[in-house]
Image (cartoon, rainbow, N blue to C red):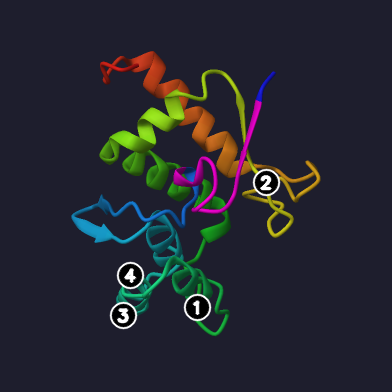
């Protein structure tokens, strides 16, 4: 089986990164990146959400989202995969280029390859959960099975 590895928004398949500059509209709010959306969803305090949305870069949004001086929403750990799935679906629906890149992967295994993250990524050595890669493959499968897109 072919494996496609991505990480950097500037690298090959970088459009799969949550840091890629693909503005995404979710619930009537435009987020600069899916990272901005994901990090903002960690909080129920609307002023904190606004700060995350307004972050200049996805790195800044991630830094705010990891700030444990800010109170995480109750149940975050049990909902974070659904939040990520929602972000990826919206991005793929709204950006033809990202959808085409995803479909171009065929039936390849998609892996966020980084030693910096063993939950969303592969931990750098394949021991991680690769949840983002699995979500991308799930969305790819949904596109292929539902026939919404003519290129599918």
The label nearer to you, 2 versus 1, is 2
Residue 87 lies left or right of residue 115; in this view the side is left
Give the alpha-carbon distance from disc 3 to disc 1, as whole Å.
12 Å
Specify few, some or many for label 2: CA neighbours under 10 Å numbering under 14, 14-19, or 20 or more.
Answer: many
User: Which contiguous range is marked in magenta?
Assistant: 3-15
Question: CA gap, disc 2 to disc 1?
Answer: 29 Å
Q: Nearer the viewer, mark 4 or mark 2?
A: 2
For this view, does 142 lie left or right of residue 68? left
Q: Which of marks 3 and 1 is nearer the N terminus?
A: 3
Residue 119 among magenta residues: no
Q: Which of marks 2 and 1 is nearer the N terminus?
A: 1
Badge 4 is on which residue? 53
Q: Earlier in the sequence, mark 3 or mark 4?
A: 3
Task: Tell me if 3 is positioned left or right of 45 in this view.
Answer: right
**Which badge, 4 or 2, is on the more N-terminal residue?**
4
Dot 2 corresponds to which residue? Answer: 113
């Amino acid at each position: 089986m072919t494996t496609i590895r991505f990480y950097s928004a500037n690298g090959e398949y970088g459009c799969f990164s949550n840091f890629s500059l693909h503005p995404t509209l979710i619930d009537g709010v435009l987020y600069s990146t899916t990272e901005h959306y994901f990090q903002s969803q960690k909080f129920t305090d609307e002023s904190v959400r606004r700060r995350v949305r307004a972050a200049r870069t996805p790195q800044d949004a991630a830094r705010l989202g990891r700030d444990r001086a800010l109170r995480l929403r109750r149940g975050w750990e049990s909902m974070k995969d659904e939040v990520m799935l929602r972000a990826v679906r919206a991005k793929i629906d709204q950006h033809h280029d990202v959808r085409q890149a995803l479909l171009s992967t065929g039936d390849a295994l998609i892996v966020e390859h980084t030693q910096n993250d063993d939950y969303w990524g592969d931990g750098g050595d394949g021991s991680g959960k690769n949840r983002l890669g699995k979500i991308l493959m799930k969305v790819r499968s949904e596109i292929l099975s539902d026939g919404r897109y003519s290129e599918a």
